[in-house]
Amino acid sequence: MSVRGSDWAEGWRLAAGTLTAVHVRPPASVDRQVAGAAMLMATAAGLLVAVPSGLAGWVLLALGLPPVAAAVAAVAAAAMLTRGLHLDGLADTADGLAAGGDRERMLQVMRSGDVGPVGVVTLVLVLVGQIVLGSQVVLESGPWALAAAMVAARAVLPVLCVDGWGDARPGGLGSTMLGAVPAYPAALVVALTALAVTAVLSLVGMGLSGVFAVPAALLGGVGMAAHARRRLGGLTGDVFGAAVEVALLAALAALAVASS
């Protein structure tokens, strides 16, 4: 992938404008190079979500509220700062995979946008899991450890954009991203994210235990995406969002165990 300097600038606008609620000028055009650059900067764009979310948790702790309140504030802030995009993808993916029938039937349910009972239950379970595990992480290591887990979860996105996953819904949101990231740059971004997340977690008192955050996030997110691919014949933008939420849950589980 040959990426020009302008592609990186346009890619940043695409990443920030799509993955966060931050208002940025939309990219002039979106091609494979711009899409690939955007996904390589997904973890950097994740800072626009993670830092304010960590700050929200820190403020509540400073006011004397318990860790669970800080975790609720951080998770709620992340939902608002992403416009609920990833959570919407999680609900749609859960409803689609639960619909049964052939792949066209599942994709039709996902495309409808109506949240069904399975989607609601999945949302509740994942959010409760993030809050419960997040409160344990906040109790042991503070709100910035929870924020670091949010960044770790975004490391799954460039991995899902490496060639070979397949496009379940050509023309959908994820089509331009799929296959737009070569394997080596994706691996480099994952490695750099792991180093940065481990460094932050070490600074907040977790030591080298933080090294498990990114691998756990990848295990959860990639595992979820692989299951969806097996059922749908490829990935969609909704699956990307679902993978991020599952990746966050897995990262928090690893950190909760490591910090206890």
Image (cartoon, grey):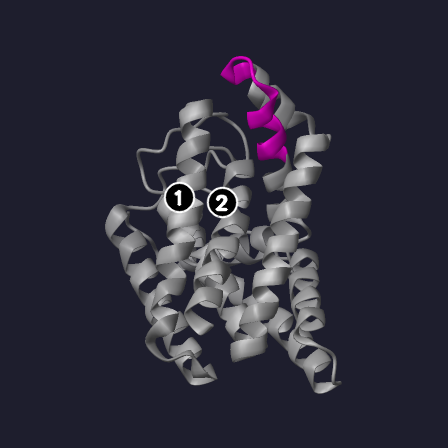
Residue 201 found in image quarter: bottom left
Q: Nearer the viewer, residue 200 or 163?
A: 200
The prevailing secondary structure element of the residues shown in magenta is helix
- Give the residue at x 37% y 80%: 207
Relative to 63, is 23 above or below?
A: above
- Give the residue at x 65% y 54%: 128
Question: Within the magenta stretch, is there residue 155?
Answer: no
Task: Look at label 1 and name its amino acid.
Answer: Val
- Mark 1 — residue? 222
Q: How many marks?
A: 2
Region rendered in magenta = 92-104
Q: Classify mark 2: residues with Cα within 10 Å, few (<14), some (14-19) or many (20+).
A: many
- Mark 2 — residue? 243
Question: Within the magenta stretch, is there residue 98?
Answer: yes
Task: Look at label 2 and name its amino acid.
Answer: Ala
Q: Is residue 76 left or right of residue 90?
A: right
Q: Which mark is residue 202?
A: none
- Give the residue at x 30% y 63%: 191
Relative to 219, is 144 above or below?
A: below
Q: Position of residue 112 (x, y in %)?
A: 68, 25
Contact flag, marks 2 and 1 (Cβ < 8 Å):
yes
Is tag 2's residue or tag 1's residue first in the polypeptide sequence?
1
Q: Position of residue 105 (x, y in %)?
A: 58, 15
